[in-house]
Structures are given as C-alpha cells and as structure tokens.
Image (cartoon, rainbow, N blue to C red):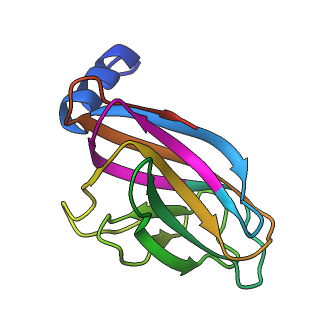
Amino acid sequence: MALVNQSQRDASAIFSLGNHAQKAAAALPQTATQHLFVITGGRVLVRLLFGEVTTIIQNSDPAIKVTATPTVGTAVDIASTVDITSLEVGGLLVVEGDGTALVKGNAGCSFFAGGAHEFIAPTGYIDLISGASKTGATKWDLYWLPLDDGANVVSA
C-alpha cells in the first residue's frame, strides 16, 4: 500500500519544486536544435531541469548542450556541451543553469551542487542542441515558478 497517493505527490512537488512540464521521449536532434520547452506570457524561474536517456546513446563522440533561446534577444547556453558517449538507458543529464557543462550520470544517480540549478528564463524556447548526428533518445522534466503574471511553460 502506498503511503501517499498521486494527488498528494503532485501537491508536494508543486510546493517544493514548482509547476512541472515534461517533454516526452524523443530521438536526439541530428546536428540540429530540438525545442524542449516553450515559455510564454513572461519570465519564469526554472527550479530544476533534467533529462533521462530512454534509448542508449551511440558510442562515438555525441555532444549536446541546453540553450535558452529568447523571443527577443540573444541565445545563451544554460548548460554547455558534454560528451554523452554510450550513456545508458536511465542515465541522467542535469542542468545546473550556470553555463557549465551538463552533469551526466549513469542510471544509479546524478550529482549536482545544491541550489546551483536555478535560473531565470525569458519568453522563448529552451532547446537541446546536438553537435553530431548520433542515435539515442532522451526525455526531459522542468520544474518552474512564474515570475510574471501569465507566464507559462509547456512541452514544445
């Protein structure tokens, strides 16, 4: 018997992490940009952004990064490139939000500095950019709080 039901888990997540948006599993972009999330209506505070490998990553030099691409202004890397060669199913990719490399970890666990994963994102997209055409797939989760009235985040 579960200690808490799904509604209780959802409420707990909202109070501790914020609203949740999820990008379903998709193949890696092939030397291209893939929109993960779209932000509309104003700025948001991203509390946590991470991906999970759903199909093993090809074993030859695939590198990815995560970028905030605003509707107005210049794109900024919120997580610079990391080599994800042969990352296993269940492997995690955590965005610290300070422009340093994605933090990768095998399916067992992924470590990151506490609190270092928050950043402010404007209206526009959060993108996954691949520097090579390689096989593999990921899904992504984003927890966020609105900073402007009407701000919203959904899967792209």
Q: Is residue 116 above or below residue 71?
A: below
Residue most extreme to the front: 72
Q: Is residue 7 above or below residue 120?
A: above
Asked if the magenta segment contains residue 145, the reply would be no
Residue 140 placement (x, y as % from top left): 53, 47
Residue most extreme to the bottom: 61
Quadrant of the rendered structure where residue 9 is? top left
Residue 100 placement (x, y as % from top left): 36, 78
* Residue drawn 58% across the image and 38% down it: 156
User: Which stretch did the figure color magenta?
Assistant: 34-51
* Residue drawn 68% across the image and 79% down it: 85
Residue 40 placement (x, y as % from top left): 40, 33
Residue 123 placement (x, y as % from top left): 38, 42
* Residue drawn 41% across the image and 65% down it: 110
Asked if the magenta segment contains residue 39, the reply would be yes
* Residue drawn 45% across the image and 34% down it: 21
Quadrant of the rendered structure where residue 18 is? top left
Q: Is residue 2 above or below residue 155?
A: above
- Left or right: where does residue 95 sit relative to residue 150? right
- Left or right: where does residue 89 sit relative to residue 149? right
Name the dominant secondary structure of the magenta segment.
strand
Q: Which one is in front, 104 or 130? A: 130
Report if residue 75 is visible in the image.
yes
Disc tally is 0
Quadrant of the rendered structure where residue 107 is? bottom right
